[in-house]
Image: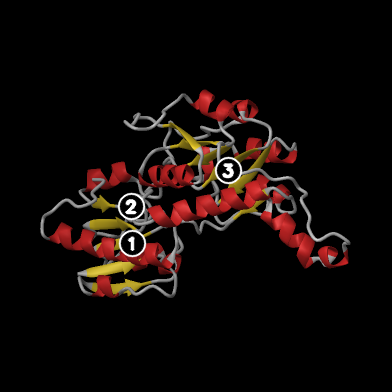
Amino acid sequence: MNIVVLDAATLGADIDLSPLHAVGTVIPYAATSEEEMPLRVREADVIVANKARLNAATLASATRLKLICEAATGYDNIDVAWCKEQGIAVANVAGYSTHSVAQVTLAMALSLYTHLPEYHSFVASGAYSKSNCFNRLEPVYCELAGKTWGIVGLGNIGRQVACVAQAMGCRVIAHTRTPREGYDCVSLDTLCRESDIISLHTPLTDATRHLIGREQLTEMKDGCVLINVARGAVTDEEAVAEAVLSGKILFGCDVYAREPLATDHPYTKLLDRTGVCLTPHMAWGSREARQRCVAEIAENISAFYLGNARNRIV
């Protein structure tokens, strides 16, 4: 069985691929362009991919292909309907990055809410050493305890962030397609109006595309912290940039509609702003999470060849 890994670099050079080697012949490529795709997938029985676009055009030569393993939870890079028509199975990995993303979400919230970069810059610039006061308390920051943290999406990650937020003393409210028992689920408008911090943890679908736009941003409190660790297009990125530039919100973001961040992206206007934390789609990728991801992919492949539907999308 040939297992072709199309973008192994997205898993990191430090990750052990031995779980995959245990179930087949692994052919890893650091990255694969659309031009390189036809030759590389021709002999593939299984394709492992994270961001590579997999559809009728890019897989035309993959006549042996039986299974696509998404090296992530989201699978918007795969034309699932076409795969179903062709009898190609698709499996993803769920739950492997829950603690990693929750950790980064909390780190962004704490950094932005407490203005840590500004305080660090004051010390690093030498201004603190030259001052005649033992401390500095500007910009003013507030405690998370007693604040309202709004969570959009109550999957594994959203629920873990809710747990972390509650541990910090926050009141947690949530907006989700399917309300869950034990959570204070509210409308999106209510969440935007009442929250001091809003974090996004919903998949990208037709229903969630631009879920956070100008109307929702206008509803938010002045100084609200907005964090997007879901998908870039869950927000109207131009509208978010405008809200940051106007001073309406503080903003943390790990995901973008086009990745890597294009030089003409609206967020490039924010690169020298305080109250902004932009990261390169790394929230999912703790070492532990990436190793769990590889192990889960190997389990998905083994299950498929045993006739079991494990983590199957189609």
What residue did someone put label 2 on?
95
> In front of the other: label 2 or label 3?
3
Q: Quadrant of the N terminus?
A: bottom left
| Crowd tier of the residue under label 2, counting other residues whose Cα lies within 10 Å: few below 14, some 14–19, many 20 or above | some
Q: Are marks 1 and 3 in contact (CB under 8 Å)?
A: no
| Label at residue 293 | 1
Percent position (x, y) of residue 90?
A: 26, 51
- Distance, label 2 to label 1, CA atoms, is 9 Å
Percent position (x, y) of residue 56?
A: 34, 49
State the residue at coordinates (34%, 56%): 96
The reply to whether residue 51 is in sight is no
> Left or right: 120 with respect to 193?
right
Q: 260 or 283, which lies in front?
A: 283
**In terms of sequence position, does the residue under pointer 1 or pointer 3 come before the other?**
3
State the residue at coordinates (28%, 75%): 18
What residue did someone put label 3 on?
144
Q: Under tag 3, what secondary structure?
A: loop
**In terms of sequence position, does the residue under pointer 2 or pointer 1 come before the other?**
2
Q: 281 or 150, which lies in front?
A: 150
- Distance, label 2 to label 3, CA atoms, is 27 Å
Q: Quadrant of the C terminus?
A: top left
**In terms of sequence position, does the residue under pointer 2 or pointer 3 come before the other?**
2
Q: Residue flagged by tag 2: what amino acid is it?
A: Gly
Q: Residue flagged by tag 1: what amino acid is it?
A: Cys
> In front of the other: label 2 or label 1?
2
